[in-house]
Structure formats: C-alpha cells, structure tokens
C-alpha cells in the first residue's frame, strides 16, 4: 500500500504510518515538496485539486496495477482479488482516520 502526501500536511501521512500492524499490509509513504512540478504522475488523482488549494489530502493506493495482472482487465473480478490484502488495506484506512479524528498525530 502506498500513501502520497505533500510535506505541508505531515499529520495525514503520519496517521498511516501509525496505523500499521504486523498483521496488516506494509505501508510505504512519500511526502513530496511540490505540487508535482517534478513528479507529474503523483498529481493525477483526486487529491491534486486539494493540494492546489492549500488543503491537506493524500493519495492512497493499494498498488494493484503493480501487483495484480488482472488490474483493469476483463479478468478483474471478485475471484481474482487478494481479499486478505484488501481487508488489511481497508483496516489501515480505518485506523488512520481514527487516529486523525482522535488528534493522535
């Protein structure tokens, strides 16, 4: 799982690093210093408009396009999903949101 944020909002990224557990998928984080001037591929999702308006946001990806040969193919069905990874990723997001709501950054 990968979490990409901007350096201006470290609490968002930190909430994901604090949310991992040994039984959950590994989380890799990246805080980028600019709005994608040097890394345009990192601002191709819904988080980019928030960054451009000075609001904190992160791109959370399960990296399926690198892990699953069925990604966005006709064979991309429930049967080809890694359910354990999916559930673990969902739990990390729940944990991160809980951390943010509790102010434990």
Image (spheres, rainbow, N blue to C red):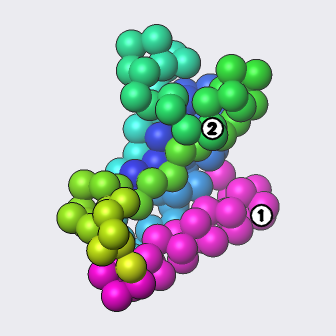
Mark before the other along the chain sequence, 1 or 2: 2
Q: Is residue 99 left or right of residue 102?
A: left
Residue 82 visible, this angle: no
Q: Residues within 10 Å of mark 1 (few under 14, many from 20)?
A: few
In percent of width and height, residue 9 lies at 64, 34
In percent of width and height, residue 105 lies at 65, 52
Residue at label 1? 102
Q: Secondary structure at mark 1?
A: helix
Give the position of the N terminus as an image quadrant: bottom left
User: In the image, what residue occupies the spot 55% across and 18% down?
Assistant: 35
User: Up-down: is 39 above or below 92?
Assistant: above
Residue 99 is one of the magenta-drawn residues:
yes
Looking at this rendering, what residue extends furthest in the top direction?
37
Q: Which mark is residue 50?
A: none
Residue 38 visible, this angle: yes
Front-most of residues 74 and 97 = 74
Front-most of residues 50 and 76 = 76
In percent of width and height, residue 18 lies at 51, 61
Q: Is residue 31 left or right of residue 27?
A: right
Front-most of residues 24 and 11 = 24
Q: Which mark is residue 47?
A: 2
Looking at this rendering, what residue extends furthest in the front direction?
74
User: In the image, what residue occupies the spot 25% across and 55% down?
Assistant: 66
Residue interval drawn in magenta:
78-105
Q: Please, what is the dominant secondary structure of the magenta stretch?
A: helix
User: Up-down: is 32 above or below 95?
Assistant: above
Q: Is residue 59 left or right of residue 48?
A: left
């Amino acid at each position: 799982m990968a979490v990409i944020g901007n350096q201006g909002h470290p609490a968002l990224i930190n909430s994901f690093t604090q949310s991992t557990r040994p039984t959950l998928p590994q989380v890799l984080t990246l805080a980028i210093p600019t709005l994608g001037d040097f890394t345009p591929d990192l601002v191709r999702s819904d988080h980019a408009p928030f960054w451009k308006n000075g609001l904190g946001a992160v791109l959370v990806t399960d990296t399926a396009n690198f892990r699953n040969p069925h990604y966005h193919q006709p064979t991309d069905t429930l049967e080809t999903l890694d359910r354990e990874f999916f559930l673990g990723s969902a739990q990390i997001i729940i944990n991160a949101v809980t951390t943010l709501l509790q102010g434990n950054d």
